[in-house]
Amino acid sequence: MILIKDGRVIDPKRGIDDVLDIVIEGKKIKKIGKYQRSEEYDRIIEAKGLTVAPGLIDVHVHFRDPGFTYKEDIQTGASSAAAGGFTTVVCMANTKPCADNVDTLKYILEEGKKTPIHVLASGTVTEGMKGSRLTDMDALKEAGAVGFTDDGIPLTDELLVQSAMEKAAELGVPLSFHEEDPNSIAQNGIHAGEVAKEMGLAGAPSLAEEILVARDCILALHTGARINIQHISSGNSVEWIRLAKRMGADVWAEVTPHHFSLDEQAVKKKGTYAKMNPPLRTKEDRYKLIEGIKDGTIDVIATDHAPHSEEEKARPFTEAPSGIIGLETSLALGITNLVRKGHVTIMQLMEKMSLNPARLYGLEGGSVEEGKEASLVIFDEKEMWTVEKFASKSCNSPFVGEQLYGRVKYTVCAGKIVYEDA
């Protein structure tokens, strides 16, 4: 048994914020209350001054396995997740081969079972991620797919998207969409704004995102499908989603820590380490994203953890791949840039990083309750640390060298301590 003693327990599901003890037996939380230290416990975690919350859930990660394991693999990705306080992740399907078939999906899930956390996986929406024919969604769901996405490649055929939504609604699973109309983009990875002009680039306008966001909100309203708009970057996209929710569409929205923490100016300082799809946009867009987080328009904080090698990121800006890693800085960026600045409370942050992700996919998790699985993150909200080393294979983060607040001390998954701060 494990006793977590005197921690500030946050349960966003039940609204609990109190100093309590937690007793873990096996994989479950046995008791929550006040208990004496004793020799009956195999381990006592002294959590005075620390926050104890539900294990974080990331619905948007790229573990690059199979096909690109020089960037990341399922084992190192899971280690990175555990170091960041995550006990469940949902892998995207754009591997090589992509997860448009049962064999690849099962490989990902079987490898995930070898890790200390819960590794779930999506299937692709279309065969080969080519955007022309739907996959066998029935077979993929039966094999364990928790949802479907062609993340990384936008779907431009609206009739196919409508068919995918109708099928997903029938299966009762969410669809996640990467919203960037390629016809509106000259160069990806950088906003079509003042920084792009300084670099002599046309860039990617927010219009490219907004066109597809509006389309899919309308289709979701008419099909009844649950959809997740991934990595929102545009303030106008927030408005479209706010309207769709008001009209009754089952639309969910995620934002990344880098999009609510940085704007297009970061490209001048960080170069390719600030190149991502969709790109960092204006300061005004960033403020509107934060407003969307505050008023509940944006439901989920997800990392879009996207490892790349140093050699790839060292290429010229137009040739380097887009994307950054994020699992090990996500919680701290939320605390530093949202909680400490008064935008949200710790309770609200845990709602966006644990409870709502669980609800989106219909998972157990997002709460601290007796009889439920003991998957928890224990962190020091006030501890400042410098971003330096990563458990990930990759280090492509624009936050290297930055000082952030909020350090993960322990991650517990299914009753086992899977990460402990050295």
Image (cartoon, helix red, strand yellow):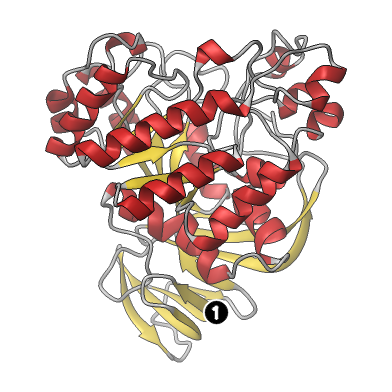
Residue 127 shows up from this direction: yes
Between 98 and 47, the one lying in front of the other is 98
Instruction: Please name the residue shown 48% across and 55% down the image.
Output: 353
What kind of residue is marked 1?
Answer: Arg
Between 405 and 268, the one lying in front of the other is 268
Q: Quadrant of residue 220?
A: top left
Instruction: Please name the residue shown 71% across and 56% down the image.
Output: 337
Mark 1: secondary structure: strand
Residue 75 in percent (x, y) is at 46, 33
Residue 406 shows up from this direction: no
Q: How many marks?
A: 1
Q: Which residue is mark 1?
A: 8
Instruction: Please name the residue shown 40% across and 12% down the image.
Output: 96
Q: Quadrant of the C terminus?
A: bottom right
Instruction: Please name the residue shown 37% across and 62% down the image.
Output: 415
Residue 102 in percent (x, y) is at 20, 20
Residue 178 in percent (x, y) is at 45, 27
Q: Is residue 329 above or below residue 156?
A: below
Between 83 and 175, the one lying in front of the other is 175
Q: Quadrant of residue 147?
A: top left
